Amino acid sequence: MNDVMRRSLVFSTFAVAIVFIGFIQSWNVALGIFNLCLISATMALGVNIQLGYAGIFNAGVMGFAALGGLSAVIISYKPVSETISLGGLGILICILILLLGTVLGVIVYKSNLSQAYKKILFPLIIIVVLLLLNLIGAPAVERIEAFEPAASGFLGGFGLPIILSWIVGGVIAGLVAYLIGKITLGLRSDYLAIATLGIAEVIIYILKNEDWLTRGVKNVNGLPRPVPYEIDLQESTWFIELCQNFGFPLVETSSIVVKLSYCFLFSIVVLTLFILSEVALKSPWGRMMRAIRDNEISARAMGKNVKARHLEIFILGSAIIGLAGAMLTTLEGQFTPTTYQPLRFTFTVWVMVIIGGTGNNYGSLIGGFLVWFLWVEAEPLGLYLVELITSPLSETNPLRTQLITNAAHMRYMMMGLLLLLVLRFAPKGIFPEGR
């Protein structure tokens, strides 16, 4: 079986599975799964650029996804005029102080001063910046967070269309990746993984505790949509007449239309990224990146700046992950910092790339589709299997009750089993990297 036939068979099987879920469960469930599969495939494409193209093991995926979600809040949420008047000026001054301190630090670092002077000036700049932030920022933050904390307590955003946050999310994640990469990309792969994981945890910690920015663990709800609301469709005359003419249920059809709208937007993003990734992979730039991945010593001998290329690929992959994070927050309509866990936003995305085939963009797509499909469907499938196996037992049997109660954990077993099977029978993934 050649590559084209294999891809056609695998993707057709996935399409049949989605249609099957639509008929057996509901089309709302099927389309909801498919939308999340598209977002997961986007994240997998970003990780594949880093791991598959350049061999960079990024353990901070959840941090960049969270930055994308943060961008959705900053761009789309309406500004809270009361908190801005209470502490907005103080926050702005603090941002300017941070920028000024960073610029001074760079100037000192690149200056011709002796190391002795630099060792004195660097700590001095840091101490002065921290003191000013504490004197100016702390009172401003207290005033902002004290204003109606149950309903507000933060600055809000710019009130712009949320779809702009997809671009901004990628830009913010890329800028943070630049700062992280300048520090960590000189490390060995295992130390790099530890460093990126630690930095991602720091990002999540900040998002959870800086209420003035994201409301912390109180979450930001009611983000605007780039698609119609169900209630608006249900009150539209043309939509009511359409449902009546075709005999469609009004409420369910409105939900399906909304999910189809998201599906259309997400599909455009995924197809665009996939095409660009394929063009980049097959270009001289892509061949250079794989040459660096396979043998850094030889690449350096040929005059390639390995660290600069690694930084370049790290920024690109992180920007795509940030874009996916903004898409996810847009779909959910809320920003919840506590949901960003390594299992969901790092380990699972690695599994997608490994199962699909590291270095193959087709593999990233099918890995994102397959893993998230099983992640969602493993719970109802596990519950069905447990009930079937324990059907001879009485309903009050302790063993039956315990198994049914823990059926939700089947998804972890399914992920582990899937990974083991693929690594055993297809060590290079479903779609291995081409020559």
Image (cartoon, grey):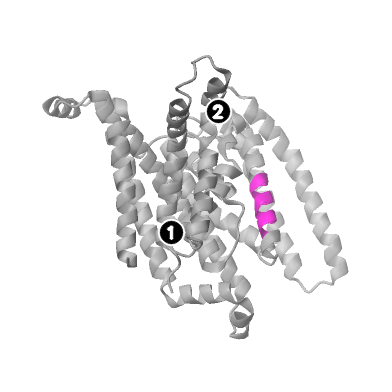
- Outermost residue to the bottom: 302
Which residue lies at the image location 42% right of the left edge and 75% below the top edge? 283
Picture disc at residue 406: 2
Residue 112 shows in this picture: yes
Q: Magenta region: which residues?
A: 192-202
Q: Position of residue 380 (x, y in %)?
A: 43, 31
Question: How far is mark 1 from mark 2, CA to CA?
Answer: 30 Å
- Image height of 304 relative to 236, above or below: below
Amino acid under label 1? Answer: Ile
**Residue occupied by mark 1:** 430
Q: Dividing the picture into quarters, in which one does residue 54 lie?
A: bottom right
Q: Would you say 118 lies left or right of 386 here?
A: right
- Magenta-highlighted stretch: main secondary structure? helix
Which residue lies at the image location 14% right of the left edge and 24% below the top edge? 244
In the foreground, 205 or 251: 251
Q: Dividing the picture into quarters, in which one does residue 111 lie?
A: bottom right
Q: Position of residue 362 (x, y in %)?
A: 39, 60
Pointer 2 local density, CA inside 10 Å: few below 14, some 14–19, many at least 20: few
Reading the chain from its start, which is encountered first: label 1 or label 2?
A: 2
Which residue lies at the image location 53% right of the left edge and 56% below the top edge? 318
Q: Quadrant of the N terminus?
A: bottom left
Q: Secondary structure at mark 2?
A: loop
- Outermost residue to the front: 392
Picture disc at residue 417: none
Q: Secondary structure at mark 1?
A: loop
Q: Quadrant of the C terminus?
A: bottom left
- Image height of 208 relative to 403, above or below: below
